[in-house]
Amino acid sequence: MKTTRLTTAQALIRFLSQQYVERDGVEQRFFAGVFGIFGHGNVAGIGQALFQYRDEMPYFQARNEQAMVHIACGYARMKDRLSTFACTSSIGPGASNMLTGAALATIDRLPVLLLPGDVFASRRPDPVLQQLEVPWRGDVSVNDAFQPLSRYWDRITRPEQIVPAALAAVRVLTSSADTGAVTLSLPQDVQTEAFDVPEEFLAKRVWHIERRFPDPALLARAVALLKDARRPLIVAGGGVIYSGATGALRGFVEKSGIPVAETQAGKGSLPYDHPSALGAIGATGTFAANRVARQADVVVGVGTRWTDFTTASKTAFANERVRFVNVNVAEVDAGKHGAIALVADARAALEELALVPISVSQDYREEVARLNREWDTEVTRLYALGNAPLPAQSEVIGAVNEAAGERGVVVCAAGSMPGELHKLWRARDPKQYHVEYGYSCMGYEIPGGIGAAMAAPDRTVFVLVGDGSYLMLPSEIVTAVAERVRLVIVLVDNRGFASIGSLSRSLGLDGFGTLSRYREDGTLGLDSEKHPAPVLPIDLAANAESLGAIVHRARTVTEVRRALAEATTADRTSVIYVEVDRYAGVPNYESWWEVATAEVSEDRGTQQARAEYVKAKQRQRWHVS
């Protein structure tokens, strides 16, 4: 066997540069590059290898380790999980900064390879700078915290271990069912040690992404259930989009007449104006989807993991005889709700279902089409509220939706906007809606937008971010400018944490701890105060400008539209700053989300919230059969 003598880091970078995936005969490179921030734990190992092989593996510099993982996730999502980045950090805080990104990647089922530096495997200089010392174990470092957050984790303590570990890592990363964060912990001395690397390890390797077909017996059971159903409903999740199944979904729907509701990750599975499209479902759903869900007798979940927002905390599907069919590549998701579990690729399963004569009544088709029209009228109303003196957030969303046109991409993650976007965004294209809501991670928006824009440079990416989330990771504006990635960032300022403020008020807590105010008389202020403390003298627009962005200050929706027109033709990232009415929210349309309330309290508002909570809990179902 021919070998080449390389360091562990050199072997790994050479290996990553030769990894490809293939699906449906289309081949593409799996790792688009490596994002990193160098420190004493990785500069001499991974850093040296990236320098040596910079023509084979591009290196990208980030400003925050958490953010670079978010960039990789945004890129992977836009690429339907068929391509991603690796992310390298130094030891200690550099590594642990990536923990939040790892959690997001694994929860959202997005592939990203994490390469945190680690302390010396030799232990000769222990304890080194930034080393965590555990009295009862000598082999623990902060990198052990990645274990529950990773789909695969390994610590490389000898150079030759990189061969089986790297192969196992990419196997998991390219698995439709098992993907997520993968962590290879790399002690700084081992990164620099050399061994004889097999040439086969360094050769081009193509990983086939299969399309698994459903089991025939289980498919027959599902078909029988659908043929007998009077009010079936499809819930389209992210798996529909990742598998490229939107065309198959549309074909099946137009043949059968079964309506479609969408999760956050599945939004855009059908165009918003398709007569069978009911829009968002669940706690952040439309009245169209939630009314149909309430009476549905068979629910087909395609590529969804059935989160509490999707099921409205198990209250959305109220029919006593409701049954579930789940199509999912992950067995754990396919088996939820006592469903007929079709462990299969979404496109393959939908194409199989389309071969069977399944059709709903004309009355049901007409009811769904009517609800689609009525909901669109409600969206039009919310887009044009004319709220004063400050615009409503829904009006800003409407302006961005208009500016996005057919191919613009909206990116968001946390706060009140994801719920409003889920309801209101008129998705025309499967890749137009990019809201990270599996982890709903504050700070994801700007780096996630960078990843989406790097994956789709021919599309304009609109980042919608509130002031609370913006303050988490504004540093990545610098990365966008440095990499010449053009984003249109719409920075919506509602003077605090608006989403949790609304939740706080619903629980009788009067916005406690959610306002951006001076502390006066020992308090940060409440929503009901007639003369609250003045707002903090923070100029977020000036902050964005100082980081290199072109900044527009808008006071009205008309000015937002004008700024959007300029920003979409600018030569670098732009930020449009606008203050909105903190209290002009979008209603909850006949839905509920469980947030536990205090069982006992001296406060009347909390007592009332508890009574409403107990009443709502009576509507919950188990869905075990």
Image (cartoon, rainbow, N blue to C red):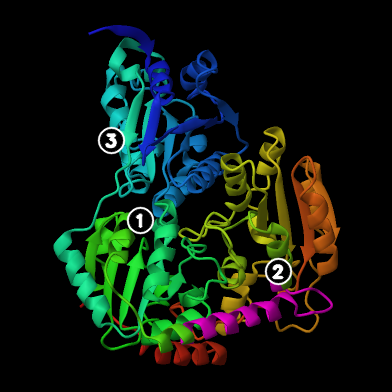
Cα distance between the residues tagged 2 and 3? 56 Å
Going from N to C along the chain, the mark reached first, 2 or 1, is 1
| Residue 598 placement (x, y as % from top left) | 45, 82
Residue under numbered circle 3: 137
Taking the view exactly as shown, the residue that stands out farthest to the left is 217
Residue depicted at x 34% and y 29%: 206
Residue at 80%, 44% in the rendered image: 570
Q: Which residue occupies 54% across, 18% down?
A: 54
Task: Indicate the amino acid at tag 3.
Answer: Arg
Helix, strand or loop at label 1? It is: helix
Say if the magenta span includes residue 247: no
Mark sitting on residue 347 = 1
Q: Quadrant of residue 251?
A: bottom left
First of labels 2, 3 by sequence position:
3
Residue denoted by label 2: 398
Point out the tag, 3 or 1, that comes first from the N-terminus. 3
Secondary structure of the residue carrying tag 3 is loop
- Magenta highlight range: 367-394
Q: CA distance from mark 3 to mark 1?
A: 48 Å
The answer to whether residue 524 shows anywhere in this view is no
Residue 327 x/y as whole percent: 30, 62
Q: Is the Cβ of the residue at disc 3 closer than 8 Å to that at disc 1? A: no
370 falls in the magenta region: yes
525 vs 6, nearest the viewer: 6
